[in-house]
Amino acid sequence: MARIKSYHIRDFDWISFALTLILVGIGLVAVYSATYRVEQPYSPFFYKQLFGCISGLFIYFIFVLTDYRSLLRWGYWAYFVIIGLLIFTLAKGHIGMGGQRWINLGIIKVQPSELTKLCFPAFFGYYLYTHHERKLTFNDFIPIFILLGISFLLILKQPDLGTALILVFATLSMLWIAGVDKQFFICGFLACAIATPVLWNCLKPYQQQRILVFFGYGSLHKERYQIEQSKIAIGSGGMTGKGFLNGTQNQLFFLPESRTDFIFAVIAEEVGFCGVLIIILLYLLLFSRLFAMIATIKHMAIQVLAMGLLMHIVFSAMINICMVTDLLPIVGIPLPLISYGVSNLWITLASLGWLNGISMRRFYIDMHI
């Protein structure tokens, strides 16, 4: 196993780390603003997010310093434990915000579905490694589809459609990198299109309502209230914003879920179009940097692992921003590194740390796991 001391300090990707640190800092300030009240400037949510940021950076460096091949092997076996945790969550999980998604550990509540974003790419990558000596056929991917289906149904049952979809989208990206025939994607898309009426009936009533709201249905004071308040906040920010802590939609309690799913609207109202454009640019720089790194990886199993670790963050950022701006239906997906939520922050930082660890070692790959 390669040791960290055999690599020079220049092998550490300081650029992606700096971009990550800036986004985490923006998120902490945004959570402070979203939860600020005159009578209690520093809310419990801010302190929890601060704890999440500090501990998350420790997690980041643990994943950087640990050899990615060891993490790949551990992640493969850990995924079976995660399946057990998902089942336990459905039976004994903490109920909140309309779902049974958390395991209460006292100080914090952990969301096992978040762990699937980190460990499913490891399961996929290690599985490919064990089959790397021969050309893969479609049948070789059946175990991947089975485990994905089980995970999807368990997460959907909580219900957490957003996380379930992120897992599917990230897996499709990994399948593409793994060389699955394009006909699979074409046939899958056509099958989903044909089965739309059946899939519609499988959705919960509130999920159907969110889709209808996206197409313009619902009352401005009921079903459409959340998205309309979000658009008002974003629009009222103008080009340069109203200033820090001066967002009226948030401070006057008009904007629901301001610290979590709709934190982008809080930021947009305070810093305006110019400010959110900088945030989007930071995401684009981070993602393009990591995509460029992934393109240099020669071993397919590690390339698939890296793609899976990155794509759940990419899809989450894209969907959240589009959701808040009414370009997509509302789903429960936080904005990576910025929204309040310790579990999501930990998993995102762990994924980025793992990617940086791969980046440090990608020119020294010796695939003897």
Image (cartoon, rainbow, N blue to C red):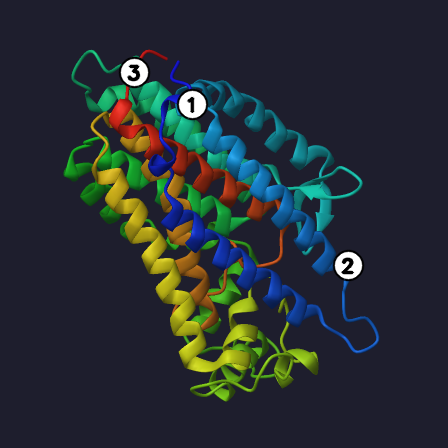
Name which quarter of the figure residue 306 lies in. Answer: top left
Q: Residue at x 67, y 30 (%)?
A: 88
Left or right placement of residue 220 versus residue 13 in this view: right
- Above or below, 258 against 238 in this view is above
Q: CA distance from mark 2 to mark 3?
A: 45 Å
Q: Residues within 10 Å of mark 1 (few under 14, many from 20)?
A: few
- Tag 1 secondary structure: helix
Q: Are marks 1 and 3 in contact (CB under 8 Å)?
A: no
- Tag 2 secondary structure: helix
- Above or below, 220 against 105 in this view is below
Q: Earlier in the sequence, mark 2 or mark 3?
A: 2
Residue 5's mark? 1
> Which residue matches tag 2?
44
Q: Residue at x 50, y 35 (%)?
A: 116
Q: Is residue 333 visible?
A: no
Q: Earlier in the sequence, mark 2 or mark 1?
A: 1
Q: Earlier in the sequence, mark 1 or mark 3?
A: 1
> Which residue matches tag 3?
367
Q: Position of residue 141 (x, y in %)?
A: 29, 24
Please state which amino acid type lies under the numbered disc 1.
Answer: Lys
Please state which amino acid type lies under the numbered disc 2.
Answer: Pro
Q: Residue at x 60, y 79 (%)?
A: 244
Q: CA distance from mark 1 to mark 3?
A: 19 Å
Q: Position of residue 350 (x, y in %)?
A: 50, 38
Residue occupying the far right of the picture:
39
Q: CA distance from mark 2 to mark 1?
A: 40 Å
In this orientation, which residue lies closer to the viewer: 279 or 220?
279
